[in-house]
Amino acid sequence: MRETEYETVIGLEVHVELATKSKIFCGCSTAFGAAPNTQVCPVCAGLPGALPVLNRRVVELAMAVGLAAHCHIGRVCRFDRKNYFYPDNPQNYQISQLYLPICRNGSLSIDTPAGEKQIRIHEIHMEEDAGKLIHDEWSDCSLVDYNRSGVPLIEIVSEPDLRNAEEVIAYLERLRLLIRYLGASDCRLQEGSMRADVNLSVREAGSRSLGTRTEMKNLNSFKAIAHAIEGERRRQIERLREGKSVVQETRRWDDNKEASFSMRSKEDAKDYRYFPDPDLPPVFIDEEWISRVRARLPEFQPEKQKRYQEQYGLSAEDSRILTESRRLAELFEETARLSGLPQKAANWLTGETGRLLKERGREADSLSFSPEHLAALIGLLESGRINRNTARLAFARMFDDDTDPLAYVTEHGLLTERDDSALEEAVRAALEENPGPAAQYREGKTKAFGFLMGQVMRKMDKKADPGHVRRLLEEML
Amino acid sequence: MKITDLTALELGRRIRGRELSVREALEAVLKQIHENETRIHAYITLADETALFARADRIQKAIDEGSLTGPLAGVPAAVKDNICTEGMATTCGSRILSGFVPPYQATAAARLEKAGVLLLGKTNMDEFAMGSTTETSWFGPTKNPWDESRVPGGSSGGSCAAVAAGEAFFALGSDTGGSIRQPASFCGVTGIKPTYGTVSRYGLIAYGSSLDQIGPVARDTADCAAVLDVIAGYDPKDSTSVRRSDPGSFTSCAASAAGLRIGIPDDYLGKGLDPEVKDAVLAAAESLQEQGAQVRFFSLGLVRYAIPAYYVIACAEASSNLARFDGVKYGFRAERYEGLHGMYKESRSQGFGSEVKRRILLGSFVLSSGYYDAYYLKALRVKAQIRKAFDEAFRSFDLVLGPAAPAAAPRLGESLSDPLRMYLGDIYTVAANLAGLPGLCLPCGKTKEGLPIGVQLMADRFQEAKLFGAARAYEQVRGTFPMPGGKKEKEAAR
Amino acid sequence: MAGKIDDEMMEAVAILAQLSIREEEKDAVREEMERMLDFVDQLNELDTAGTEPALEVISYGNVFREDEVTNGNEAAAMLANAPQKQDGQYQVPKTVE
């Protein structure tokens, strides 16, 4: 008998920390890495009598993400309280949105082996982040730090349109790129500024109804997400094959143990008693405000990639790499404009830049050198005033601290020699010292030319323009 | 006349006119506190006297230099203990907040201090403002200065008793379902619950956030208006605060009843209303009519639904508002418990009194899945209809007049045995909270036993000026309402 | 309407409220709640079918603060009231095994 085939159905709840200066409901800083509880006030520490006041920027960023994800922006939205007791939540309720979220009914397209696929977005809502719990291994206590309490989040809830880990990761990458383009968040999974909860169920292939789903939390890398999906899919199928049922529950993924664990407890009543927060009047969003936010939306990656191929004649691959970071794309366009050499600019920004980013463990969004300097470097190289080796050295310095390439090569005496008499002298000397290879070349053995080139360059302390050396050497041979 | 018999405005006038010093005013009120407090127990916390005198001197200096000119400069006053005061314990009358010293100042208290008011201390209240007698306080009940065997009303019983007993020239209270107006009526003082959003709630420890308002309690209407002028105004820290242009002008509202259309709901005069209260209230209406007001009876409707709607909404909000009291960040933590949830449950069960727990449980229930629509949303729909009924009434009337409570102050211990009956005592006051209306209560007579009776005036949202005008007109005819003699004086007089 | 709240419901509500109800109080607490709910049930006499639930009674425009950091380090003041603290943090019973 053939075993039943199962299909996996996945929906994602993605939390993204918004890159605002201050928290969602108070004037505390959101900066990372401060000492515990040094960025808290009566509002975000849940002191009695304190009241929330909404940060306008949070609404604008949520709207921008919603518009970029083709959502409908509600004309009225409001905040609700989600009630549950946990010490990372100083009020013992989280201010979130249930009944009237800011965005609904959007979609994002992802590339799959079978072609482009639309993933529908159910809603995007705004909410506040919780504090951080630190567990002391040696005592029976946990410690609470409220610095993250009240940091603004958006939660992007997809429809159950995803079918496997590859699609999930493609969707997350798509979302991350879009949000980074907006400057709405840096979306780092490891640091928790992007977090994905995976809702997964399985059903018999071909079935149209949904199976019972579980929700997995604590996924802080694409690898963990892929592992968790595979593990949970298998666990559910095994249960079904054993004739057991899947229990609707929240499970915590443990990446070290490569397994998920039930988070249910008796105290976990899972009845959040949402109700409209009486401390926060509704937010009204009119057509004019939407238009203003829409007008400020950047050109996103897919359109930009297509344009680079058409406008600059770049390859699909170069265009893709350049548009994976808005910063990189901006550097490219500006350098191309200043230097008039888009392909050269693309080469530097895909090849050498990529190598150094990898070597330094940095992301393209963090690139800090100026397009003026890169354009200058390209100019120096193309005019033969520096050679490729020097250009690499100067680029590395520019990459690290935006050093002006011209100043750098001048200071270090790396400009190619323009004094033809010195070069002529060097060529003459090389030919005299190496009569054998010179004769070989004249007999048609072109290989010897390279040897002679090297000899000249060595004499010139590598400060000669190779093109110029080549011409002179050919002449004198 | 004793200094403590002066109104706040009269005291302020004499201080500015160099007839009295701030120190003398403070000494007089402290003497009154020392004499009465052991019997009345209006305060939970009294400010440090050395610090008070130092502040009195600073205020005096500012007045002398001309940098402090307001009508309340140098006036000693009290603040209800659910209003956060920086550096001064704030308990809400609850064990769960024992030891809590706020690191920040409520906006209303800050505004008073800026106006040169001396904050004497924090007044007693029903725990978390849940009660109508001030008997649910963890710190013990407050006695009614008119008859110490009786309650002062609640929940702002401490504030009203302090003002009645001369232990403060005025006080701040808070009103969620009548908590200023009902005790004002029991204590023979004047109190106003302003339009929702008029006084910032920043620093007011929430009970029912959509209903709570801070308001003044004072000797007469002019004092209330002067205090409201100081504490009212837009506050960027409270998103529900309203920008309105009239705060600052309430003190100058002239007595005026002529031409006012006053409606008395028939529904407020029926079964359950003590005849003595009814007579006094109707006499007050007659007095206003004699001054040119047109008084008419009408049917308001929905009156009996206000209390159940109120309890659902207030308890729902309270169950969430009071979740933060959990033994983690401030206040009481139980000594013995097992694990996190054990700590929560023990701290909360020992820290909250029974009335508070009753309301938290009810509130948790009405919000729980399966009951949200049937109870919570239903109550909000009824609230909408009640609001509409008042909107209609205010198309025909400038003011709605009625009692503030069904009877005068009950004896201590009488009410707690039957919570539901106690809740019904709010029947004339809760509607103003549901509809966001301003309501003013002022004394209009006494029972045969010598207990004060209050009359309540309600106006449409933002129409406080009409309340002040009519109340002052009534006061002109009524004359100064006496301060309680207290048992001691009565006995001496015999 | 006695019997509206069964044991299971009573326990669930106590968990939501994080209150412990002693065995000997249970009946009294349940009775009080049922009595209160009966009282509240009179709201059902009113037809509210066409009525929208009222939240705010005042109409507000948008209320925002601008995205500016206005608060400094208030750690000492915030922690001053904590019943138990350690290393500048609030101490609670362990939340994980």
Image: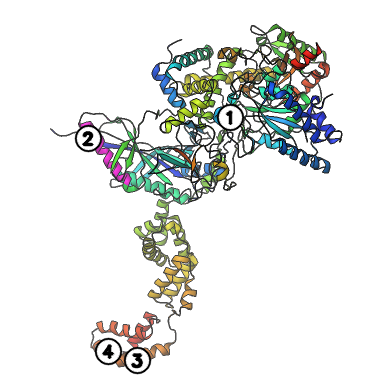
Q: Range of the magenta residues?
A: A224-245
For label 3, the crowd category at 10 Å Cα-Cα, with few meaning under 14, some 14 to 19 and many 20 or more, is some
Protein chain holding label 4: A
Is A227 a magenta residue? Answer: yes
* Residue neighbourhood size for the residue with mark 1, other residues' Cα within 10 Å, grouped as few (<14), some (14–19), many (≥20): many
Q: CA distance from mark 2 to mark 3?
A: 81 Å
Q: Which residue is mark 3?
A: A428
Q: Position of residue A102 (x, y in %)?
A: 49, 37
User: In the image, is residue B95 above or below residue A427?
Assistant: above
Give me the disc on residue B206. Answer: 1
Q: Amino acid at mark 1?
A: Ala
Depth check, front residue: A100 or B234: B234
For disc 4, the marked residue is A438
Q: CA distance from mark 4 to mark 2?
A: 77 Å
What chain does badge 2 belong to?
A: A
Please identify the residue farthest to the bottom as the structure is shown: A432
Q: Element under label 1?
A: loop
- Give the label, 2 or 3, closer to the camera: 2
Q: CA distance from mark 1 to mark 2?
A: 51 Å
* Quarter of image, res B98: top right
Amino acid found under the numbered disc labelled 3: Arg
Q: Where is residue B226 shown, x and y percent of the image?
A: 76, 30
Q: Which picture quadrant has residue B219?
A: top right
Tell me if I can see residue A116 in this picture. Answer: no
Q: Earlier in the sequence, mark 3 or mark 4?
A: 3
- Mark earlier in primary sequence (4, 2): 2
Q: Badge 2 is on which residue?
A: A238
**Which of the image's four quarters has the C terminus of chain A?**
bottom left
Measure the alpha-carbon separation of dots 3 and 4: 11 Å
Q: Locate the N terminus of chain A by quadrant.
A: top left
